[in-house]
Amino acid sequence: MIKFSNLNQETPYLLFKEKYDEALNKGQKVIEGISISSFNKEINLVDSRYVNLKYITDKEFIFFSNYNSPKASSFNSHNQIAALIYWQSINVQIRMRAKIKKTPNDFNQKYFFDRLKQKNALAISSKQSKPIDSYDQVKENFNKSLKNDDLKKCPEYWGGFSFTPYYFEFWEGHESRINKREVFNQVNGVWKHSFLQP
């Protein structure tokens, strides 16, 4: 589930919420799953991964991660991303282009404090994407953290990322293949509305 608060009332945000509610009502699984693509200028590499979108607050889309992870390095190197959601239950994909930044520390602390201790133990114990000798070592590190660490205090190397889209494309698939592609592109603070051919 994605938590919405003070949702921006501009058309692309309202349309996003409309499609979200429609997919939710159709029983969409893993509705919060979103693919984030980034470019790391330091190593000249493009990469993608799925994350769990937790909040949409006003214009900001928020997820959480390790700040020492490869994706965080990419965001630090180049703050422009592409995001993609596909909801199979309604055959809709939503493409976004956005600028990304870290969320404030007090926001991270509050979110971390309210999470399950098992999730926090994993966040604390894992050096995300770094090599390790075995999966057993992963479990050992997790159990050690679960027993010994302060699981209510968010570490400095973990927190949120917030992205603000300047481009939305709402793609609706149809059996006829005459798919609908509706675009909102922000130019000088104004949303330009158009359609793309299938």
Image: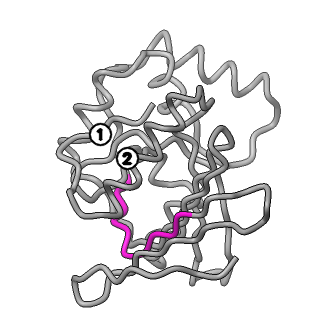
Main SS, magenta region, reads strand
Give amino acid for label 2: Lys
Q: Position of residue 157 (x, y in %)?
A: 40, 47
Residue assigned mark 1: 4
Give amino acid for label 1: Phe
Q: Position of residue 37 (x, y in %)?
A: 60, 66
Of all residues, the one furthest to the front in this rendering is: 176
Relative horizontal placement of residue 56, taking residue 94 as reference (left or right): left
Q: Is residue 157 visible?
A: no
> Neighbour class for label 2 at 10 Å: few (<14), some, many (≥20)?
some
Residue assigned mark 2: 17
Relative horizontal placement of residue 137, taking residue 104 as reference (left or right): right
**In the rendered image, which quarter contains the C terminus?**
bottom right
Residue located 74% across and 47% down the image: 131
Residue 94's quadrant in the figure? bottom right
**In the rendered image, which quarter contains the N terminus?**
top left
Residue located 67% across and 75% down the image: 46
Residue 70: assigned label: none
Residue located 72% across and 69% down the image: 178
Of all residues, the one furthest to the bottom in this rendering is: 188
Q: Position of residue 6 (x, y in %)?
A: 17, 45
Residue located 62% across and 24% down the image: 141
- Secondary structure at badge 2 equals helix
| Magenta region | 161-170
Q: Are marks 2 and 1 in contact (CB under 8 Å)?
A: yes
